[in-house]
Image: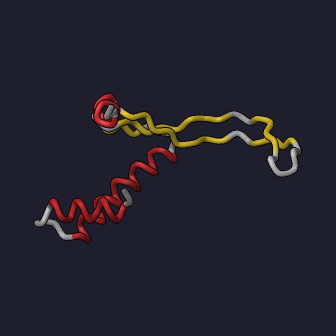
């Protein structure tokens, strides 16, 4: 689902709200989550999951095209851990 699809679905389920209001709300929520993660914080949405930042230390990598060893610098990457409810809903066996 894209951001536009999310906005469209929310607009159809909430006819009292305008699409611009919903778009602003979605953008505000996502921006707040991004800023929190950029500061090294953690975002938790109960029943859905949590977003955090993982540190990946520097390592020696290999260029697959040339085979030359290169150093890959340390970096921080976003990480999502699904909550129990989301895992149970997604486990359709």
What is the x, y in percent for residue 70? 84, 43
Residue 6: x percent and y percent?
30, 59
91 vs 78, left or right, is left
Along the line of sight, the residue nearer the viewer: 76 or 89: 89
What residue is shown at x 45% (from left), y 51% (from top)?
Answer: 34
Quadrant of residue 4 within the rendered picture: bottom left
Q: Which x, y percent locates residue 82?
A: 39, 34
Residue at position x 16%, y 60% from top?
Answer: 13
* Side of 51 where 73 appears, left or right: right
29 sits left or right of 18 in the view: right
Q: Which residue lies furthest to the front in this view?
A: 93
The reply to whether residue 46 is visible in this rendering is no
Of the pair 31 and 68, the residue shown nearer to us: 68
Is 76 or 59 nearer to us in this picture? 59
Residue 17 seen in the current view: yes
Q: Image point 86% across, 41% down: which residue?
A: 69
User: In the displayed image of the protein, which residue is found farthest to the left?
Assistant: 16
Task: Say which quarter of the image contains residue 85.
Answer: top left
Point 87% across, 50% down: residue: 66
| Above/below status of 78 relative to 19 | above
Q: In which quarter of the image is residue 8?
A: bottom left
Quadrant showing the N terminus: bottom left
Q: Say above or below: 24 vs 57.
A: below
- 6 lies above or below 71: below
- Give the number of marks: 0
Q: Position of residue 93 (x, y in %)?
A: 33, 31
């Amino acid at each position: 689902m894209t951001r536009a699809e999310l906005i469209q679905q929310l607009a159809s389920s909430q006819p009292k709200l305008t699409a611009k209001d919903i778009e602003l709300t979605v953008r505000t929520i996502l921006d707040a989550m991004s800023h929190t993660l950029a500061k090294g914080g953690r975002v938790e949405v109960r029943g859905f999951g949590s977003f955090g930042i993982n540190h990946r230390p520097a390592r020696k990598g290999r260029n697959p095209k040339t085979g030359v060893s290169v150093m890959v610098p340390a970096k921080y990457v976003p990480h999502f851990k699904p909550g129990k409810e989301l895992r149970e809903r997604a486990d359709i066996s």
